[in-house]
Image: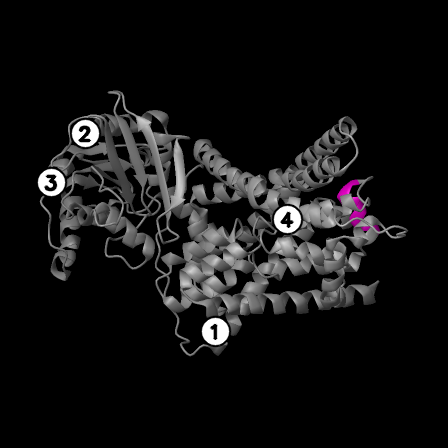
């Protein structure tokens, strides 16, 4: 063992608490990237042990078996076996197992043991095991497995001391490597039964609290009602909690922009700073609180163990529209961003179901749409109370999310009708125990997602905002011009050319122009509108929302909301579809059907709204 550092690989089944253990060990000293050539996430952190040794910890994708059926399972196998190109083999493998469910997890432990590498077994969630009356003879289990076994409680700061002490001590001996064949894999079940009989005493197979809660959460009627109420309350909270903070940030940027403008001489530089940076970037940054509120609830539901139950509950409905219950979690991830949602489809082993999920994932309302929704809803939908309780703006936001879901179901159903293979596939999945979300893990998740948003803000959104300011400012108006200066700019000419395409769905030239940068990143539609209307002088008083209400009828605003519910996804999403499916044809299908769906839905919305008004 190296005296200076140690490379540790964390492996385990999904829902074993491996990521919580990783967070407890490494805290904020983490970096997230992708493995070379694939979209599998690579999460690495480090910490210093009491002896002073630097420990590098790699959190490998969760898997139920090393007999890989998906890219992330293949990477877990190859890294542990020292076969992954360019990745040094780990000095030590720490296999994390849920102590409340060893019947499932011990099989994977035995699979990892066959690799013949130094190994430690971490029995996680020992507090939950004790509450359920589960007694584990740790010493006997360690003797029979031939490896150190330590108890951990990943959600407690002191719960990893035994593991740290173990990995900071003498390196355990590597067990002999064993062949990987059908006969040896079949023998694993017998070994698990023997280990459980000798080392584990369980009063009952499942937890009484889980069973009591599942009688309601998994009920075919009450369970669906509970899920609908939970999701409705999430979107109410986005407006009730996030909107005041968004307004405060917007007021702060308006104040700063006014004072900075007063300090600078009039000219292009002043316009760039006030109209481009404060008007564009500041407007998008203001929506960060609403995005974080949405993520807070999604992370809380994920940490609580509720999401797999929602997937199980919706399986019958999703199969009816050509998807599968396994599609639920990737689709739910797409509410944050379609990219990790599409990457999450790797857990769907059936190629047909996986492709269907990939093609409908972009219809889920990602967080990049939220700034557009919040802007238009805040400008055009009054903050009235519905039934004396609910915020009308939150109801409209919920309806937009529902439209995306209904659109995905429609597309999935059409795909099911036109494909040759109409067979259905049973859903087999583990339902983890319910648990209280830990603030530390939720906070780390919020931090990571907030930083992703800020990196986009200071990267592609900043660049596109500067470009939008430039084309909105130059060239200047000719001598004797009577129209606003922006009408003579590059943006004015380009927007009026695009308006011929989008006029039938109620878009003016400013809205038509904003769709171009939105293809790179949807949030930039807000920055583009803020810049265009600021340069044109329309947002000088009252802000962007006021400028939209003055220049944009309600029918057009509703049409734009529907457009963004179905609009073709950003370039990054298309690139991931190409990468995951290795097919430009699937990219063309995805872009084409979404453009057609968005255009038709917006056309109907606009003309119905005009007729009703």
User: Which residue in the protein does label 1 denote?
Assistant: 416
Q: Of marks 4 and 1, which one's residue comes earlier in the chain?
A: 1
Crowd rating for badge 4 (residues with CA inside 10 Å; few <14, some 14–19, many 20+): many
Q: How many marks?
A: 4
Crowd rating for badge 2 (residues with CA inside 10 Å; few <14, some 14–19, many 20+): few
Q: CA distance from mark 4 to mark 1?
A: 35 Å
Magenta segment includes 399:
no
User: Which residue in the protein does label 2 denote?
Assistant: 2
The percent coordinates of residue 105 (x first, y second) are 25, 47
Q: Which residues are magenta?
A: 543-550
In the depicted structure, whether residue 458 falls above or below residue 75: above
User: Main SS of the magenta segment?
Assistant: helix
Q: Of marks 3 and 1, which one's residue comes earlier in the chain?
A: 3
> Which label lies toward us, 4 or 1?
4
Please give left or right for residue 70 compared with residue 442 in the image.
Answer: left
The percent coordinates of residue 84 (x first, y second) are 25, 49
Crowd rating for badge 3 (residues with CA inside 10 Å; few <14, some 14–19, many 20+): few
């Amino acid at each position: 063992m190296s005296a200076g550092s140690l490379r540790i690989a964390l492996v385990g089944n999904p829902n074993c608490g491996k990521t919580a253990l990783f967070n407890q060990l490494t805290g904020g000293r983490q970096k997230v990237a992708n493995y070379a050539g694939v979209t599998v996430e690579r999460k690495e952190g480090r910490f210093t042990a009491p002896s002073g040794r630097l420990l590098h910890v790699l959190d490998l994708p969760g898997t139920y078996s090393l007999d890989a059926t998906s890219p992330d399972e293949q990477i877990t196998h190859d890294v542990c076996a020292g076969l992954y190109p360019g990745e040094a083999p780990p000095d030590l493998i720490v296999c994390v197992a849920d102590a409340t469910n060893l019947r499932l997890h011990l099989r994977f432990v035995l699979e990892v043991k066959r690799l013949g590498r130094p190994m430690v077994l971490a029995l996680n969630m020992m507090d939950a095991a004790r509450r359920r009356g589960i007694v584990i003879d740790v010493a006997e289990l360690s003797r029979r497995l031939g490896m150190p076994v330590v108890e951990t409680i990943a959600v407690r700061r002191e719960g990893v001391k035994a593991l740290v002490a173990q990995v900071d001590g003498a390196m355990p001996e590597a067990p002999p490597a064993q062949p990987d064949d059908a006969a040896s894999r079949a023998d694993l079940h017998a070994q698990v039964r023997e280990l459980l009989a000798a080392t584990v005493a369980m009063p009952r197979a499942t937890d009484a609290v889980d069973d009591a809660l599942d009688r309601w959460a998994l009920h075919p009627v009450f369970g669906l009602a509970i899920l609908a109420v939970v999701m409705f309350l999430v979107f109410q909270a986005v407006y009730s909690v996030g909107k005041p903070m968004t307004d405060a940030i917007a007021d702060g940027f308006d104040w700063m922009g006014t004072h900075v403008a007063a300090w600078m001489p009039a000219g292009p530089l002043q316009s760039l700073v006030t109209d481009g940076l404060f008007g564009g970037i500041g407007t998008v940054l203001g929506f960060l609180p609403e995005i974080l509120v949405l993520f807070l609830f999604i992370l809380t539901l994920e940490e609580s163990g509720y999401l797999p139950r929602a997937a199980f509950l919706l399986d019958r409905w999703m199969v009816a529209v050509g998807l599968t219950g396994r599609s639920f979690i990737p689709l739910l991830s797409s509410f944050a961003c379609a990219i990790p949602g599409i990457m999450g489809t790797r857990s769907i082993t059936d190629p047909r179901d996986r492709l269907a999920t990939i093609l409908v994932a972009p219809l889920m309302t990602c967080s990049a749409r939220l700034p557009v929704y919040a802007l238009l809803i805040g400008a055009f939908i009054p903050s009235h109370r519905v039934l004396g309780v609910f915020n009308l703006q939150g109801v409209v936001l919920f309806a937009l999310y529902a439209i995306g879901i209904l659109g995905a179901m429609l597309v999935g159903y059409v795909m099911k009708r036109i494909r040759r293979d109409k067979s259905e596939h049973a859903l087999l999945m583990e339902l983890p125990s319910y648990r209280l979300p830990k603030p530390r893990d939720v906070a780390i998740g919020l931090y990571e997602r907030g930083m992703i948003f800020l990196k986009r803000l200071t990267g592609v959104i900043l660049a596109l905002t500067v470009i939008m300011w430039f084309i909105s400012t130059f060239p200047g108006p000719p001598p004797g011009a009577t129209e606003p200066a922006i009408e003579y700019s590059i943006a004015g000419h380009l927007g009026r050319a695009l308006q011929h395409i989008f006029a039938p769905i109620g878009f003016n030239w400013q809205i038509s122009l904003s769709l171009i940068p939105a293809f790179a990143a949807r949030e930039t539609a807000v920055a583009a509108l803020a810049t265009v209307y600021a340069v044109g002088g329309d947002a000088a008083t009252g802000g962007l929302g006021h400028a939209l209400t003055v220049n944009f009828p309600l029918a057009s605003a509703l049409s734009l909301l529907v457009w963004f519910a179905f609009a073709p996804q950003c370039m990054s999403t298309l690139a991931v579809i190409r990468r995951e499916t290795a097919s430009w044809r699937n990219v063309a299908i995805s872009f084409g059907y979404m453009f057609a769906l968005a255009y038709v839905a917006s056309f109907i919305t606009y003309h119905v709204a005009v007729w009703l008004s």
